[in-house]
Structures are given as C-alpha cells and as structure tokens.
Image (cartoon, helix red, strand yellow):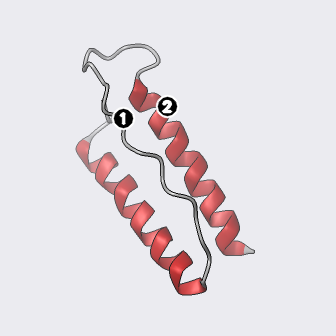
C-alpha cells in the first residue's frame, strides 16, 4: 500500500510535471509505471507498492537524465 495518499499524489504530480517539461522540449519519455492493482493491504514484505516506488524512482531518474541532455 502507498506510504501515504499524499506521497502517491506527489508521485503522480511529478509524472505529470516531467511529462509536460518533456513535451515542451520535444522529448518523448516512456510511460510512467502503472500503479499496482493487486495489493492485499496486509503490509507484506516485498509488497507490490515497494516495487512501484522503486519503479517511480527509476522513471524519475531516467526522465531527468533525458531532460538534461
């Protein structure tokens, strides 16, 4: 499950902001990682949300590298 709703909202806002910057610069970014839809809500070790947060970080790093070049 997401760390908090605001963290999820911040991640979605970050996706949007970086996609807008890329579009303005004529740069194509790959699609952001989709949110998991199979969380059981029991706080499992290795929860699907942990993987999503890792993918969010990777997507952000990759997007910023493309925008800097």
Looking at the image, which residue sits at the far right?
69
Q: Is residue 26 above or below residue 32?
A: below
Q: Position of residue 6 (x, y in %)?
A: 26, 49
Out of 11 and 25, give the one closest to the viewer.
25
Tell me residue 21's x, y (percent): 51, 78
Looking at the image, residue 61 lies above or below residue 43? below
Q: Quadrant of residue 66?
A: bottom right
**Mark with earlier residue (2, 1):** 1
Residue 32 in the image, given as x and y percentages of width and height: 48, 54
Q: Which residue is mark 1?
A: 36
Q: Which residue is mark 2?
A: 51
Asked if residue 51 lies left or right of residue 61, the reply is left
Compared to 7, does 15 lie above or below? below
Q: Which mark is residue 58?
A: none
Quarter of the N terminus within the rendering = top left
- Where disc 1 sits, the SS reads loop
Residue 11 location (% of width, % of height): 39, 53
Contact check, label 2 and label 1, Cβ < 8 Å: yes
Q: Secondary structure at mark 2?
A: helix
Kindly identify the residue that appears in the image at 58 percent across and 65 percent down: 29
Question: Which residue is drawn at the image coordinates 24% and 44% (left, top)?
Answer: 5
Q: Is residue 39 left or right of residue 18?
A: left
* Rendering quarter of residue 16: bottom left
Q: Which residue is depicted at the point 30% across and 33% down? A: 37
């Amino acid at each position: 499950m997401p760390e908090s709703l605001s963290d999820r909202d911040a991640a979605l806002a970050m996706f949007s902001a970086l996609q807008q910057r890329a579009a303005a610069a004529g740069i194509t970014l790959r699609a952001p990682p989709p949110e998991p839809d199979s969380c059981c809500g029991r706080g499992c070790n290795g929860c699907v949300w942990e993987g999503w947060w890792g993918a969010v970080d990777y997507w952000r790093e990759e997007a910023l590298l493309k925008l800097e070049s």
